[in-house]
Amino acid sequence: MNDNNKLGELYPAHLEMVRRRADKALEKSGFDQLVIFSGSERFKLFDDAPYPFFANPQFKAWLPLTEHPDCFVIYRGGDKPKLIYFQPEGYWYAPPEPPGGYWAEHFDITVINEAAKALPLLPDSGRVALLGEFADEKMRPANGEVNPGELVNYLDFHRAWKSAYEIECMRRANAIAARAHRAAEQAFRSGASELEIHLAYCQSAGQPDNELPYSSIVALNEHGAVLHYQNWSSSRYANGALHSFLIDAGASFNGYAADVTRTYSASDSGFSELIERMDRAQKHLCALLKPGVSYPDVHFAAHRAVAKILSEMGFVKIDPEASFDAGITRTFFPHGVGHYIGLQVHDVGGFMADEDGALQAKPDGHPFLRLTRELDDGHVMTIEPGLYFIDSLLASLAASEHAKHIDWDRVEAYRKFGGVRIEDDVAVTVNGSENLTRGALDKLAA
Ligand SMILES: [Mn+2]
């Protein structure tokens, strides 16, 4: 079966799910219709150069149009959805193709050649919920309430459950990322700079920066200790001065994200042992996932795993449970173990307790955990434990009562490596999980 046939087969059930969700959201919140805007282009100040365009995720949930500003989906419960498709004429920019593909037959489509022609086609009476960002006044519908909380809460809460079509899109995003991670590792092994590695990654993915779901983190040596290291340095390290490489980089497919991190050691040093141990711990955490599991428990399991590694490798001189209880692991692992992923790399709804917008609190002392919900079949999330040597956090630990439990010489010897993070995207299934990232990497190896 060719690739598009498979998506075409899965798409109708996906759209059905999106429609049913919209029906309930409308009914619950008392609106008659949904009007979902893809978004407007935005421009640099005092300039005619646009910023990269990123479509409203609520719009992308309906159909795979990611590079299409000034389009609207209009939906009234039970009706076939309508699409207002903006296809400008002109010769300054390449216009979008005419609407087509496996999704097109499921919409009543009106093509317009001027954005302003959309507004008269929108519902001018009844209670209308407008979803999107209406930064450009000229594109703001006259009738409707923008992003009403009750309706948005319902959609955000339920977006945690992905359709088979969405999971297939994320499998493909992971296949692209897996291939590009291979190319990045090769570039690192050949002594490339961060910028060169970044370009090798984009080249292999076939996606320039703006198409990736987030800005890639490409960190050599101690840069790996900066969690969201944002520079792409063009300097190469001399042989012997290059120690380690951490890359956190994803890929997009039809508006869905992959988010993948790998760490490499330049030589067969103690740092490779640390990477291997973290990799084993990460796989163990992935194996915990199944319906009914509370995600904060996975986060705490990650801290216990980090505690064990810190003790076994001699960074911490007390036993793992004591170091976990003392909070020492938070110095070395100062972020959450993962987050939902889908239409957004950090997908919405991670803190929701119910569809009405009640929140599920983060555990005390863990302010950076982005997901506090109970997992279910069809949820997709990252699992990304890390272990880093971060100067500022180590300084606080050195000034604390726990300083005496640390082997500071050993810590010092590892600072040049920055840190380790291993991150996969995992879909929870009826009785376990599917690792979308390792699945893609295994396919490459086969
Ligand atoms: Mn992530």
Image (tube, helix red, strand yellow):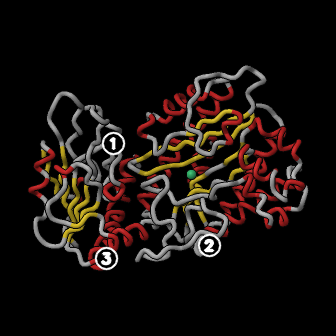
Residue 161: x and y in percent read 46, 67
Mark 1 or 3, closer to the camera:
1
**Which residue type does callout 1 highlight?**
Phe
Q: CA distance from mark 3 to mark 2?
A: 27 Å
In front of the other: 130 or 75: 130
Residue 314: x and y in percent read 89, 50
Q: Is residue 360 above or below residue 415?
A: below
Dot 1 crowding, Cα within 10 Å, few <14, some 14–19, many 20+:
some
Q: Residue furthest top?
A: 238
The image quadrant of residue 430 is bottom right
N-terminal of the two: label 2 or label 1?
1
Q: Secondary structure at mark 3?
A: helix
Callout 3–callout 2 Cβ contact below 8 Å:
no
Q: Is mark 1 within 8 Å of ligand 1?
A: no
N-terminal of the two: label 3 or label 2?
3
Q: Is residue 195 above or below residue 78?
A: above
The image quadrant of residue 180 is top right
**Image mark for residue 24:** 3
In front of the other: 217 or 59: 217
**Image mark for residue 53:** 1
Q: Residue at x 25, y 54 (%)?
A: 134
Callout 1–callout 3 Cβ contact below 8 Å:
no
Dot 2 crowding, Cα within 10 Å, few <14, some 14–19, many 20+:
some
Residue 60: x and y in percent read 34, 54
Q: CA distance from mark 1 to mark 3?
A: 30 Å
Residue 267 located left or right of residue 131: right
Q: Secondary structure at mark 1?
A: loop
**Image mark for residue 293:** 2
N-terminal of the two: label 1 or label 3?
3
**Which residue type does callout 2 highlight?**
Val
**Image mark for residue 153:** none
Q: CA distance from mark 2 to mark 1?
A: 37 Å
